[in-house]
Image (cartoon, rainbow, N blue to C red):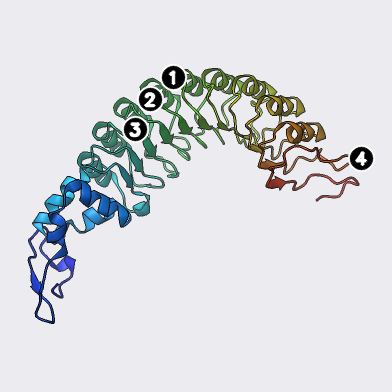
Amino acid sequence: MSGETPEEQEPCADVGDDVGDDGQEVVDCSLVLAGFDPELLLQLAEMLGNPLALLVSKAHLSKAFCEAARNAQGLLKHIDLCVWKRTVNDAVVAAVASKCPQLSSLNLHGCKNITDEAAKAVGSGCTQLTWLDLGGRHSHVITDAALVALASGCTQLTTLNMCGCWRELTDAALVAVASGCPQLSSLDLSYSFNITDQGVVAVAAGCPQLMTLNLGGCGNITDVAVVAVASGCKLLTALNLTSSGNPYITDVALLAVASKCPQLSSLNVAYCYHITDAAVVAVASACAHLTSLDLRGCYHITNVAVVAVASECDQLTMLDLGGCFKITDEEGWRWPQGARRLTALRLLCARARRGETQ
């Protein structure tokens, strides 16, 4: 190859052959790649890392490769744009959506410069999308309109991450998702502060295949929302209700989960202050597949709950009891024989027999 860098070549101009130092003809690799079948070129790009990065960054080497790369982009099914999260904007997303109609997964996690327009482009251009991550932005530039557009166009969605959307999303967005995305199996709405029972109830009714739901930090939801989820989403395996002292999540919510969701394997009710032993005992008795239980900050929990969990949950590998001040190692108390698979146990601030902190 000549000493010119790709940037010095005219975009999409045929570079042609060159002569090496030994006098042998050197063939431009872009011309070789240009002769590849688009599917083969795509497989090669995927083997080398981020396929979109290769196909776009090298497309300027020759007109032939430019055409080959364009054809291969049309076959892309998975694109991760979060590696360029500081620079990705609406125009970039619109270009991807228009050139990659077969996309099934798109990662836009942390892309703070996109707005509703990007979501609308995805909704209209990526109708085969099943996995979408719009979380981690902590901005105020995507509104309900974005999810309305996505729900209308991406009706095959099974996974949607909207974590950290803070105050811009409301129940109207969830109503749209519930209506347009009935195949949804995983939904992350953590720290969406304006979400209320109305939106969650709609999701519970419209998305019966839901298996994973993250409502951590959604301080406006109550037992009503959780009861609806338990009743409508019987396949539920993971539920996150992490709170910052939400007084509206009580034993009523967990009793509903225990009675309706026998497949539950992960439950996080950290800092749900009103949870008591009765609810934990019910979950332990009914959810035999439980592997992870987070009870941090549930200060009404006592040894009664611990005994029930350790005795009934044979599959348990993680138990967090941090801040559960009523749990003690009182004289004569022994850890039950169950929970033999436990690999992580957190007891920070649980009280020792004489009252000292462990």
Q: CA distance from mark 2 to mark 1?
A: 8 Å
Q: Earlier in the sequence, mark 2 or mark 1?
A: 2
User: What amino acid does circle 2 point to?
Assistant: Cys
Residue that numbered label 4 is attached to? 332
Task: Please name the amino acid that badge 4 sits on.
Answer: Gly
Give whichever of discs 4 and 2 has the lower sequence position. Answer: 2
- Mark found first going from the N terminus, 1 or 3: 3
Q: CA distance from mark 1 to mark 4?
A: 50 Å
Q: Nearer the viewer, residue 195 or 299?
A: 299
Query: At 51% across and 32% down in the image, what residue appears?
Result: 212
Q: From the viewer's perspective, is the residue at label 1 or at label 3 nearer?
A: 1
Binning the other alpha carbons within 10 Å of mark 2 as few (below 14), some (14 to 19) or many (20 upward) gives many
Q: Quadrant of the N terminus?
A: bottom left
- Separation (CA) of disc 4 from disc 2: 54 Å
- Give the image quarter of residue 241: top right
Percent position (x, y) of residue 316? 67, 38
Q: Which residue is mark 2?
A: 181
Residues at discs 2 and 1 in contact (Cβ within 8 Å): yes
Mark 2 element type: loop
Position of residue 281 measured from the top left corner of the image (x, y, whole percent): 74, 27
For marks 3 and 2, give the CA distance: 14 Å
Which residue is label 3 attached to?
146
Instruction: Tell me the amino acid under the disc marked 1.
Output: Gly
The residue shown at (62%, 23%) is 257
Q: Quadrant of residue 22?
A: bottom left
Q: Type of residue at label 3?
A: Ala
